[in-house]
Amino acid sequence: MPAVKGIAGSCPSKDSIQDYLDMATLYKNEHQYQKALDYIEMIEPYDEFNTEIMYQKAELQNSLNRLVQSEKTLNQLIGLNFDYACSPLSMQMDEYNGKRLCKSQKPNFSNDNLAEVPHR
């Protein structure tokens, strides 16, 4: 794994953390999900409440078909910021699990399911 500056110390700089996020994104875009996750997991202890890190981790776990881990990470993230309940990954998991956390998700009605309501 290529070295990225500054993480070896006990308190990495924001630039070092961003370098690792950038490397993770690079590997993710190349569909090398395990390498990307490795970078995320290296910086996670230094900024454990960083929502960008948590969301990328959940996406990568999902891409690696680690659905239970991905859902756990996503639920922790939603606990920190409920807006993530409406994220594409959350909606995908909700659909898979048959639940709906995001209030903006509208029920799927087709014309066959609608009852005619008389007008007054």
Image (cartoon, grey):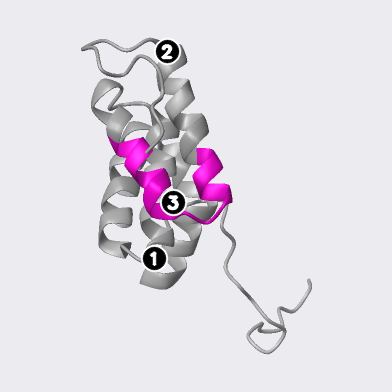
Residue 5: percent from the left, percent from the top?
40, 17
The magenta stretch spans which residues?
A: 25-41
Q: Amino acid at mark 1?
A: Lys
Residue 53 appears in which quarter of the rendering? top left
Between residue 77 and residue 54, name the one nearer to us.
54
x 36%, y 66%: residue: 65
Structural distance between the alpha carbons of marks 2 and 1: 37 Å
Check disc 3 and report the residue beneath it.
59
**Residue 30 within the segment the image draws in magenta:** yes
x 38%, y 10%: residue: 13
Q: Amino acid at mark 2?
A: Lys
Between residue 29 and residue 93, name the one nearer to us.
29
Above or below, 55 against 44 in this view is below
- Judged by its main secondary structure, the magenta piece is helix
N-terminal of the pair, mark 1 or mark 3, is: 3
Q: Nearer the viewer, mark 2 or mark 1?
A: 2
Q: Nearer the viewer, mark 1 or mark 3?
A: 3
Structural distance between the alpha carbons of marks 2 and 3: 22 Å
Residue 67: percent from the left, percent from the top?
32, 63
x 42%, y 63%: residue: 94
Check disc 1 and report the residue beneath it.
99
Q: Nearer the viewer, mark 2 or mark 3?
A: 2
Q: Amino acid at mark 3?
A: Glu
N-terminal of the pair, mark 2 or mark 1, is: 2
In the rendered view of the protein, which quadrant contains the N terminus? top left
Check disc 2 and report the residue beneath it.
14
Structural distance between the alpha carbons of marks 1 and 3: 19 Å
Q: Is 25 on the left or on the right of 76, as rendered?
A: right
- What label does residue 3 carry, if any? none
